[in-house]
């Protein structure tokens, strides 16, 4: 996210004699305590200066404009500021999706090579991250392109200028992005895993949102906004069942009741899943 609020920092390590990178993330549930409200976080995000603002929509809009003025224009990071401004809401529409540079370029009205540079700027200014595809040795060929995730739900919605109650078609990507942020934060603060990726066969039709690797062991995680998980929601986790070293398969959902499927898949309400992540039990 914007370096002038709560983002990554670099400083010298006197013992190692080299720069050490530390990244701070949006406020996490354990940091917010009783103030945490998932519905509000998915709508406005949890960047501290926005979360604590009396008028969150106005503060988010100002944040987006400040980013363009101080991070991009003032530091002369792009030659064509209007083109970059057109690119931002288009890139926001790709939140939680596999990167399609040609589609981004077409919709933003810029060259494909320009899109690559713009994505690098968003990553360098801590607004987006990229989730790589895992190349498992299963019976199918996996995709190779990474997924694009914005680092905060409120910021991605501000870039789209959509600060009303999230529409049904938004909620899936917003929840998946929030879970991704939760996993990334615990990795930064507590070393949750050795590698994080997603898995999906190249022909499409099924996928697993997140695959955590610890040594040779894996945890597969699928995120759904449903309150009543049905067999169709378990398809990706069942498709990856043959992965060597797979210890847990977890479906994160918006319902209230945890349960285990007949083949051992765990269905956990989103806040119970968050507690497992924050406590290190995942």
Image (spheres, rainbow, N blue to C red):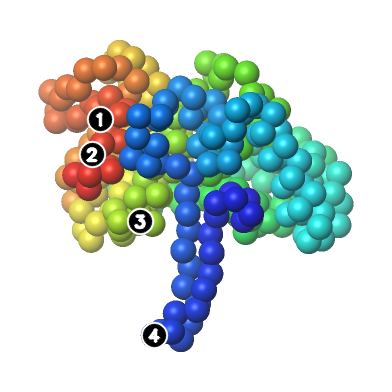
Nearest to the observer: residue 276 or residue 44? 44
Res. 6 mark: none
Question: Under tag 2, what secondary structure?
Answer: helix
Q: Residues within 10 Å of mark 3 (few under 14, many from 20)?
A: few
For the residues bearing labels 1 and 3, Cβ distance under 8 angstroms: no
Question: In the drawing, what numbered circle is on residue 189?
Answer: 3
Asked if disc 2 and disc 4 are in contact, CB closer than 8 Å, the reply is no
Q: Position of residue 110 (x, y in %)?
A: 81, 45
Q: Earlier in the sequence, mark 2 or mark 4?
A: 4
Q: Considering the numbered disc 4 on the image, is that residue within a helix, a strand or a loop?
A: loop
Give the mark, 1 or 3, whose residue is nearer the N terminus: 3
Residue 271, given in percent of the width and then of the height, sits at: 30, 29
Q: Is residue 87 visible?
A: no
- The foreground one among 191 and 56 is 56
CB contact under 8 Å: marks 2 and 1? yes
Residue 85 is left or right of residue 258, and the answer is right
Residue located 30% across and 56% down the image: 190
Q: Which residue is disc 1 drawn over?
A: 272
Return the residue at label 2: 276
| Quadrant in which the C terminus appears | top left
* Distance between mark 2 and mark 4 Cα atoms: 34 Å
| Disc 4 target residue | 15
From the viewer's side, name the closer residue of 178 and 226: 178
Please report the residue visible at 76 percent of the width from the left and 41 percent of the height from the top. Answer: 65
How many marks the image carries: the answer is 4
Mark positioned earlier in the residue sequence (2 or 3): 3
């Amino acid at each position: 996210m914007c370096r002038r609020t709560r983002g990554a920092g670099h400083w010298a390590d006197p013992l190692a004699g080299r720069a050490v990178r530390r990244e701070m993330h949006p406020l996490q549930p354990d940091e917010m305590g009783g103030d945490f409200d998932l519905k509000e976080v998915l709508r406005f995000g949890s960047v501290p200066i926005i979360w604590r603002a009396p008028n969150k929509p106005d503060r988010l809009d100002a944040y987006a404009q400040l980013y363009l003025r101080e991070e991009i224009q003032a530091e002369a990071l792009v030659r064509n500021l209007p083109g970059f401004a057109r690119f931002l809401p288009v890139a926001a529409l790709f939140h939680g999706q596999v990167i399609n540079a040609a589609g981004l370029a077409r919709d933003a009205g810029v060259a494909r090579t320009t899109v690559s540079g713009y994505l690098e700027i968003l990553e360098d200014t801590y607004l987006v991250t990229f989730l790589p595809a895992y190349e498992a040795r299963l019976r199918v060929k996996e995709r190779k392109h990474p997924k694009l995730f914005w680092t905060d739900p409120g910021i991605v919605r501000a870039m789209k200028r959509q600060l009303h109650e999230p529409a049904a078609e938004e909620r899936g990507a917003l929840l998946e992005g929030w879970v991704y942020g939760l996993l990334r934060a615990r990795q930064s603060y507590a070393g949750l895993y050795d590698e994080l990726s997603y898995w999906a066969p190249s022909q499409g039709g099924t996928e697993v949102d997140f695959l955590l690797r610890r040594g040779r062991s894996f945890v597969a995680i699928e995120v759904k906004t449903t309150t009543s998980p049905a067999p169709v929601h378990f398809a990706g986790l069942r498709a990856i069942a043959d992965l060597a070293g797979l210890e847990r398969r977890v479906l994160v959902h918006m319902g209230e009741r945890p349960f285990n499927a007949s083949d051992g898949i765990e269905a956990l309400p989103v806040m119970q899943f968050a507690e497992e992540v924050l406590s290190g039990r995942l």
